[in-house]
Amino acid sequence: RFPESAMSELPVDPALVAQDWLTIQHTTWNYVGLVRTAKRLSRARKILTELQAEVEEFYAKAEMSDSLIGLRNGVRTALIVLQAAYGARHSRGGHYRADQVPEAALDGLVKNWTHDQWLDYWEEAGSDKS
């Protein structure tokens, strides 16, 4: 066994930090972004929890730096956003749940539309605002 003073902290590799940031950005954009489904959110959870475990393990062993602290906070924030997206089962504002029925149907205003009819409805609703 080596004495603790002989063990040095691991240096932070900027390429790894940059790649992890790209993983966070692409995962949240593609799976937690504007159009969401339960399957996409589930995939994002798997990717981000795995990344968080890797970052936390490295965080415990590495030399402290602003980039590493930022990365740790970034993956935690992405998981918080993901948790909020899981809880938002209805389409609101700029976010659309492709696997959920719009509120109009829940209110009994529109019934028995196909998925394509709902997509047309949302496209028209979005074009009315521009």
Image (cartoon, rainbow, N blue to C red):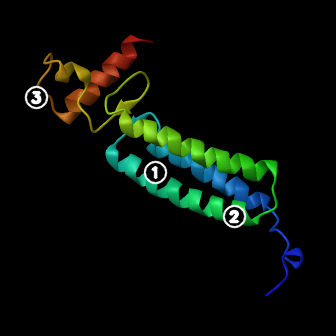
- Foreground disc of the pair 3, 1: 1
Q: In this view, does 41 lie above or below 130?
A: below
Q: What residue type is labelled 1?
A: Ala
Q: Which of marks 3 and 1 is nearer the N terminus?
A: 1
What is the CA distance from the residue labelled 3 to the residue labelled 2? 51 Å
Which element is circle 3 on?
Answer: loop
Residue that numbered label 1 is attached to: 44
Residue located at (44% from left, 41% from top): 83
Residue located at (33% from left, 45% from top): 38
Q: Quadrant of the C terminus?
A: top left
Q: Is residue 59 above or below residue 84?
A: below
Q: What residue type is labelled 3?
A: Asn
Q: What residue type is labelled 2?
A: Phe
Residue that numbered label 3 is attached to: 112
Which element is circle 2 on?
Answer: helix
* Image x and y of residue 57, in percent: 65, 64
Q: Quadrant of residue 118?
A: top left
Residue that numbered label 2 is attached to: 58
Residue located at (51% from left, 41% from top): 80
